[in-house]
Image: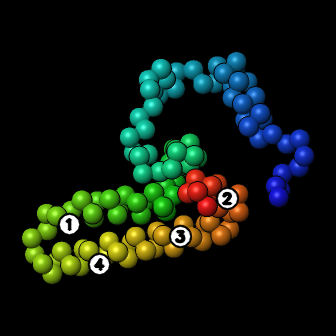
C-alpha cells in the first residue's frame, strides 16, 4: 500500500519544475550540456536503480551496494594475478565474505519491499 496521498504524482511535479527551470534559463550552460551521459560506471547497477544512484552520486553519495559491488569486482579480477598461495586464499575468503554480505543485504531489502520482491520473483519465474 502506498503512503502517498491519492492524486499525488511526484513524477509530474518534478517534470513541471524542470520545465519551469528550463523556461527561466536556469539550466542553460551547465557543464556537459549537449554531451552524452557517460554511464559506464553503472554497469553493475540494476537498470531501474541507475537514475536514482546517479542523482545520489552527483550529490556526493554512493550507495553501499555500489561500493561493495566495485570492491567485489576489483578483488575478483585481482585473484588470478596473485602468485602467493596464502595471499590468494585470503583474497578468496575475503571475496566470499563480501559476496555473502551483499547477498544478505539484498535478502533484507527484498523482505522490506514487497513490490520489489514480487517483481524479482516474477522475473525469476516464481
Q: Earlier in the sequence, mark 3 or mark 2?
A: 3
Quarter occupied by the C terminus: bottom right
Residue 2, compared with residue 79, is above or below; it is above
Q: Earlier in the sequence, mark 4 or mark 2?
A: 4
Kindly report the distance in space between the C-alpha atoms of the residues bearing marks 3 and 1.
24 Å
* Residue bearing the label numbered 3: 105
Q: Are marks 4 and 1 in contact (CB under 8 Å)?
A: no
User: Which of 13/44 is in front?
Assistant: 44
Kindly report the distance in space between the C-alpha atoms of the residues bearing marks 2 and 1.
36 Å
Q: Earlier in the sequence, mark 3 or mark 1?
A: 1
Badge 3 element: helix
Badge 2 element: helix
Residue 60: tell me if it is visible: no
* Residue bearing the label numbered 2: 118
Tag count: 4
Q: Earlier in the sequence, mark 4 or mark 1?
A: 1
* Residue bearing the label numbered 1: 79
Kindly report the distance in space between the C-alpha atoms of the residues bearing marks 4 and 2.
32 Å
Q: Is residue 60 left or right of residue 119?
A: left
Please state which of the two labelled residues, at mark 4 or mark 2, is closer to the viewer.
2
Please state which of the two labelled residues, at mark 2 or mark 1, is closer to the viewer.
2
* Mark identifier at residue 93: 4
Name the quadrant containing residue 35.
top left
> Which residue is pictured at 52% across the width and 45% down the height?
47
Amino acid at each position: 500500500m502506498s503512503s502517498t496521498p491519492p492524486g499525488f504524482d511526484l513524477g509530474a511535479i518534478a517534470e513541471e519544475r524542470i520545465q519551469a527551470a528550463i523556461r527561466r534559463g536556469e539550466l542553460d550552460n551547465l557543464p556537459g550540456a549537449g554531451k552524452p551521459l557517460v554511464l559506464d560506471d553503472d554497469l553493475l547497477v540494476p537498470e531501474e536503480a541507475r537514475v536514482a544512484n546517479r542523482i545520489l552520486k552527483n550529490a556526493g553519495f554512493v550507495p553501499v551496494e555500489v561500493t561493495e559491488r566495485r570492491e567485489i569486482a576489483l578483488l575478483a579480477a585481482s585473484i588470478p594475478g596473485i602468485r602467493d598461495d596464502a595471499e590468494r586464499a585470503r583474497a578468496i575468503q575475503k571475496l566470499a565474505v563480501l559476496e555473502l554480505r551483499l547477498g544478505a543485504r539484498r535478502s533484507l531489502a527484498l523482505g522490506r519491499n514487497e513490490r520489489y520482491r514480487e517483481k524479482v520473483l516474477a522475473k525469476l519465474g516464481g
